[in-house]
Image: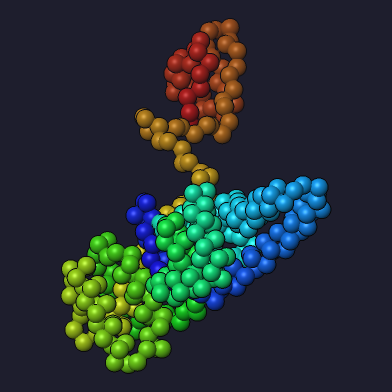
Amino acid sequence: MSELVTGEAVALELQPARLPSRALATLLDLTVAVVVYVGVSVALVLGTASLDDAAQVAVSIAAFLLVLVGGPIAVETLSHGRSLGKAACGLRVVRDDGGPIRFRHALVRGAIGVVEILLTGGVVACIASLVSARGRRVGDVFAGTLVVRERVPVARTGFVAPPPPWLAGRFSGLDLSAVPEGLWLAIRQYLGRMHQLDPQVGWTMAQRLAGDLVAHTGAPAPEGVPPAAYLAAVVQERQAREVRRASPAPTAPSSTLYAPVPPAAPAHGPLPSAPAAAPTFAPPAAGGSVAPSPGSSGDGSSEQSAGRRSGTGFVPPA
């Protein structure tokens, strides 16, 4: 993998294309270009038979430049670095910062490709690609481009084993905010492949990663804990924090929204209960006295209560 830094200071890991795949893609492109050139040449010969020799040579040179030089430049410009052969081999031409190429990049690559591919039979391009660390030919060096692989096989990573049970939750108070993402990626890659490494090499790598982690957290590793177990426990704690951060806060059950509201207590004590049956009143007698109601005792108390009720119609509760 080759690390490229974009204009936004983002590091990209791209796999440069090597000589076999590039040679196969170039061979496919040349085959298509030669077939088109032969067809155009035959059509021009039939169409310019009445012209003199100088005109026919000029038309042939124009057809050569148009098909074998201008054609690849136009195709790479319009397809952003993917010609027919490169698309078949899973390759793409990109800039040094990983961005798509433009017309000037394709023009420089095509112009220099006439010399190092067409006129020399590809010998110069093969030598330059073998010498270059990233497989670049002379046209790529002058244009500031790079041919990379688009279809990269996904590497199978091993299963990250959980830490021992006696380490679960032991690092809940550890400050992990200063640990960079690159160190987390290195730790996860080590935990996924530690069973494939030599025991001595794996132990040394675990100690180095644990030391880097301790340097960023500011807390020393517990005594007697193996470095691999320490790394696995800290990674599990970070994953648990991310899960808690991503999960929504618990809400109250919907049944509490419809709970009955108890009645408010009266300001002056409880409300009096209604009487079972209101007493009946008889019209006043001729002597001005009030006739006792049925069931009354007929004593003075009834007369006093009748005097209090006269003219109001209000019946006090029992």
| Pick the front one: 196 or 99 | 99
State the residue at coordinates (57%, 51%). 77
Question: What x and y, as percent, mark residue 163?
Answer: 35, 81
| Pick the front one: 255 or 248 | 248
State the residue at coordinates (52%, 52%). 107
State the residue at coordinates (57%, 11%). 284
- Residue at the bottom extreme, as displayed: 199
Number of marks: 0
* Above-or-below relation of 286 to 119: above
Question: What x and y, as percent, mark residue 20?
Answer: 54, 76
Asked which quadrant contains residue 43, the reply is bottom right
State the residue at coordinates (24%, 68%). 174
* Above-or-below relation of 96 to 28: above
Question: What x and y, as percent, mark residue 84?
Answer: 64, 62
Residue 71 appears in the figure:
no
Image position of 142 (left or right of 224): right
Quarter holding the N terminus is: bottom left
* Above-or-below relation of 238 to 312: below
| Pick the front one: 313 or 218 | 218
Asked which quadrant contains residue 121, the reply is bottom right
Asked which quadrant contains residue 296, the reply is top right
